[in-house]
Amino acid sequence: MDVFLVVLAVLALLGVIFEDVIHVNKAKTTLFFGTLSWILLFLSSDGASETGAISEGLTESIAEIAGLWLFLVAAMTFVAYLNKKGMIENMIYLIMPRQVTERRLLFLTGLFCFVFSSLADNITATLVSCSLILSLNLDVKKKLQFAVLVVFAVNSGGVSLITGDVTTLMIFLEDKVQILTLLTLAIPASITVFILAVLLSRGLDGQVVLEKKTNDVRRVDVVISALFLMTILCTIVGNALFKIPPVLTFLFGLSIMFLVSRFMSEDSDLDPILEYIRVIEFETLLFFLGILLLVGMLKEIHALNSLVAIYDVMPPLYANYLMGIFSAAIDNVPLTAALLKAGITMTRGEWMGLTYAVGVGGSLLVIGSAAGIVAMSKISGLTFGAYLKYSLHLLVAYTLGYAGVYLLGLVI
């Protein structure tokens, strides 16, 4: 039965990798195999004691999933509201100059992607950035240069805040890194985004004119924007000083958002605030649910021990670097979940290295991250092969960033 359950997990992983080939959403695949595997565990139980152990394992997995889900629902609802109201688009055109050189715009785009993706989810950050690229009158090669930087910058920005990347949130929730320590990852991550922008800026010597678009801004939208930033700040401070779980702070911020909208909006009947919970990416949430159920099952049957083997034959410094490269081919969520469940012992600095590696390593291939998949679907000409031409640039940036995190870990 254990072998059969491992085969199911492999089939689920293959379903994620070949989602575009089989045309079955990865959320459906992982949820099916994740729930089926636990049902088979119960059915194959030898007695009451074993059934009790399986039940305890399932309860533990469900509790971890619930914390992750609730945090993501709160954060994604904020972002969905601000995106729908045009606040994010307004911010872009507010900070971008009307006329700018292509090279300077590349650096500004990288900076925007880095900062914004640390606050919002990677998918939203990529969609907004791709909309900016498509609005420019650029040839295909130049659009590809912008798109490559967008993917790398979005993934790099997400590693330093728990609101920016799911793997960062997962590692933090397992108490492997502290929230203030995570913030320091922004230093090497931002430097490598700048380095990659320098490498990609060759041939960008033209001028572009941005057509500035503005959406009507209501007082309630400004208040909710400020509330979102305040919630992030309070999450960091509350956890650092009082160990308040981030999920509790974000749910409290979400409740204030609902109240603010109720008492400040004039269109509560036409545009009810609770509707924004329904427009968030539930496919993503269901995917995480299926993956974490599968990984919990693998832990239950002790199948994750083999994953630790690479840490037995080489130091965590090199093993983490390789895990980042693996995450370009294997989805970083199941990879990170498996590593966390495997019981690997590392220092805080080494966990920082893994956080950066699995967060940014997916940028090495266009199919290695959600940001790459979204960009490939939006930017014409951005294919697997076209992206691969910049693999050396990306590998250099990833390696330098990982080295920077290693040095930072020594200092901390």
Image: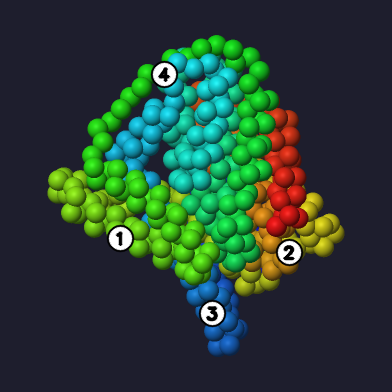
Asked whether 310 or 212 is in front, the reply is 212
134 w.r.t. 80: above or below: above
Is the C-beta separation of discs 4 and 3 under 8 Å?
A: no
Q: Nearer the viewer, mark 4 or mark 2?
A: 4
Image location of residue 42, percent across then percent down: 53, 76
Distance, label 4 to label 3, CA atoms, is 59 Å
Residue picked out by circle 1: 255
Q: Which mark is residue 56?
A: 3
Image location of residue 320, percent across then percent down: 73, 53
Residue picked out by circle 2: 346
Which sits earlier in the primary sequence, circle 4 or circle 2?
4
Which sits earlier in the primary sequence, circle 4 or circle 3?
3
- Residue that appears at 77% across and 57% down: 316
Hey, what amino acid is under mark 4?
Answer: Arg
Residue picked out by circle 4: 98
Which sits earlier in the primary sequence, circle 4 or circle 1?
4
Distance, label 4 to label 2, CA atoms, is 49 Å
74 relative to 306 in the view: left or right: left
Distance, label 1 to label 3, CA atoms, is 32 Å
The image quarter in which residue 222 lies: top left
